[in-house]
Amino acid sequence: MPGLILWKNEEINKLKRDMDRLLSRMWDDFGIRLSSSGMGAFSNLDMSETEDILVIQAEIPGVQADDLDISISDNLLLTIKWKSREEIDEEAEGSYTTGRRIRVFSRSFRLPCKVLTEEVEATYKGGVLSVVLPKCRTEAPREVKVKIQQE
């Protein structure tokens, strides 16, 4: 069975590379360059958890902290939005193009448990966004004795 899983992962990775290449060629035909991170995807995303917190780290290089926006819906859905700004200065065959390109990206993740939204902390340093999400404390199950009345 492990051989089957390995083959499946290799095939999925090959399909992903082929799709990335196809989309890149298509966008190149329209004169739009894609970043190395693909269509707004994180180049690397890690989620870890302890008994009390969830920690999400995402590599988002080349973005200013002011261009990041993080929101949490229903204590379970984390959304990270960011803007990528690019200055364009191109010279080709006697013409000169200058301008700015702003792209907006958004990624949402369903969290494995509810979190305390008031206590979430985020830092952005060196192109890495770290979000610390304290988990909601679950109430310990309590036992209630029910009296049985005799008739």
Image: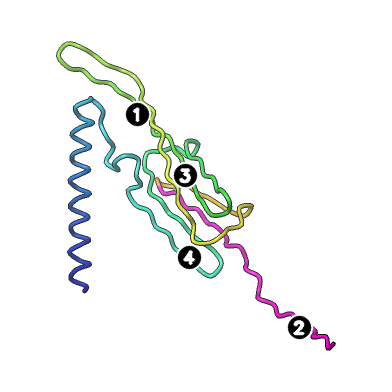
Give me the C-alpha separation between circle 1 and circle 3.
20 Å
Mark 2 Cα shell of 10 Å, populated few (<14), some (14-19), many (≥20): few
The residue at 54%/63% (across/down) is: 53
Residue named by callout 1: 86
In the foreground, 49 or 144: 144
Mark 3 / mark 4, whichever is N-terminal = 4
Residue type pointed to by label 4: Glu
The residue at 51%/51% (across/down) is: 77
Disc 4, SS: strand
Q: Is residue 26 magenta?
A: no
Residue named by callout 4: 49
Mark 1 / mark 3, whichever is N-terminal = 3
The residue at 38%/53% (across/down) is: 45
Q: Main secondary structure of the magenta part?
A: loop
Say if mark 2 contacts mark 3, CB within 8 Å: no
Residue type pointed to by label 1: Glu
Mark 2 / mark 3, whichever is N-terminal = 3
Q: In x, y percent, where is residue 64?
A: 45, 37
Mark 4 / mark 2, whichever is N-terminal = 4
Q: Is residue 84 left or right of residue 130?
A: left
Residue interval drawn in magenta: 128-151
Mark 1 Cα shell of 10 Å, populated few (<14), some (14-19), many (≥20): few
Give me the C-alpha separation between circle 2 and circle 1.
66 Å
**Quarter that holds the C terminus:** bottom right
Colour scheme in use: rainbow
Q: In x, y percent, where is residue 16?
A: 22, 49
Residue named by callout 2: 145
Q: Which image quarter: residue 106? A: top left
